[in-house]
Amino acid sequence: MAVKSNSDTLVTVFGGSGFLGRHVVRALANRLYRIRVAVRRPELAGFLKPLGSVGQIEIVQANIRFPQSVGVAARDSDVIINLVGILFERSRQRFDAVQAEGAAAVARAAAVEGARLIHVSAIGADPSSPSHYARSKAAGEQLVLATQPDAIIIRPSIVFGPEDDFFNRFAALARIAPALPLPGGGHTRFQPVFAGDVGQAIALAVNGVARAGTIYELGGPDIRTFKELMQFTLATIERRRLLVPVPFALLKLQGAFLQFAPKPPITPDQVELLKTDNVVSPDARAQGRTLEGLGIIPNSIASVVPDYLWRFRKTGQFRGHTPQGIRTTTRT
């Protein structure tokens, strides 16, 4: 039986126009795969086409809440990647519908096509979590593996990069606010991972490097508390701000009102997530189910983040970065 070359292999990426999706599409295009990007709004995803050669990247319409559209988008695929996820709920976008039932719809479509499946979940996915987000991620994993036992599950920690919603959000807040909040005192630990590294890991999984039926946990080289990440952000943008501990209970009360904003800064469910460390597990490290296990040397936040947070400094690009940073004032 002839082995398909990359250029003969069709990879369909659901949710490929999002923050992580563009890094996945770029990594696949660099390896010469044929790529079909399935998104809700194809007219807004044209920026992806220049990432590949002429005709290499096709954009189609699909909504994982509607299984028929998923099946049409998945037709003739050799590999399917599901990146679709939401950070907060809206009336027509619920965690279970998108991250559990939607994931199951993609898995069923992959089974019909005989395609390999790579499903992106999140570190912290847990069926017993107090967070609905984390429970729906766990349910999605279970439904995917029930349909496709050989599926590869990718669980990244907080993903950072030029378009991220973490460092950019707090840098923007520091530009106008006199203080930054520290949920629960800022002691929760995170292991931020570069979006480009996650994209490379997914491309390697498409290439057959990752083990079938395995859950990979992806984190960067730095494990930092929330407080340390805020200190790093302030040092990078060269601004002095108070770091104010905020009890989880008070933050949850604030989230009860803020969750109705068009793009809420915090929701009660996200407060529950902030109570638990978001780092690669010891078992994943021991078993090589990590970036390093895939042969990837992860990028640190210090090597990437300053390159896109410079615009939040008072003089932007016209002031060089101070390696030592700036001390921040902390209220305890």
Image (cartoon, rainbow, N blue to C red):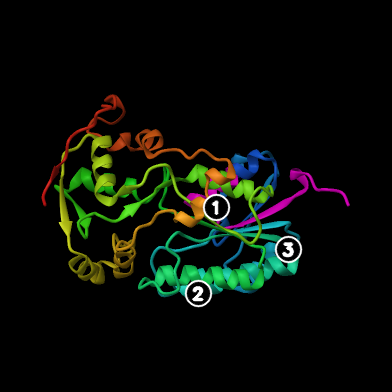
The magenta segment is: 1-26
Structural crowding at the residue carrying mark 1, measured as other residues with C-alpha within 10 Å and reported as few (<14), some (14–19) or many (≥20): many
Residue at image position (64%, 42%) is: 29
Whichever of labels 1 and 2 marks the residue nearer the N terminus, that label is: 2
Q: CA distance from mark 3 to mark 1?
A: 30 Å
Which dot marks residue 97?
Answer: 2
Residue picked out by circle 3: 75
Instruction: Pinpoint residue 36: horizontal percent, then vertical percent.
Output: 66, 53
268 versus 22 height, above or below: below
Instruction: Pinpoint residue 304: horizontal percent, then vertical percent.
Output: 41, 36
Residue picked out by circle 1: 289
Find numbered disc 2 in the image and state the secondary structure of the residue it sits on: helix
Structural crowding at the residue carrying mark 3, measured as other residues with C-alpha within 10 Å and reported as few (<14), some (14–19) or many (≥20): some
Q: CA distance from mark 1 to mark 2?
A: 28 Å
- Amino acid type, label 3: Arg
- Please tell me whether mark 3 or mark 1 is closer to you in this view: 1
Residue at image position (23%, 70%) is: 257
Q: CA distance from mark 3 to mark 2?
A: 22 Å
Q: Can residue 47 be seen from the camera position used here?
A: no
- Please tell me whether mark 1 or mark 2 is closer to you in this view: 1
Which dot marks residue 274?
Answer: none
Whichever of labels 3 and 1 marks the residue nearer the N terminus, that label is: 3
105 versus 10 height, above or below: below
Q: Are marks 1 and 2 in contact (CB under 8 Å)?
A: no
156 relative position to 69: left or right: left
- Amino acid type, label 1: Arg
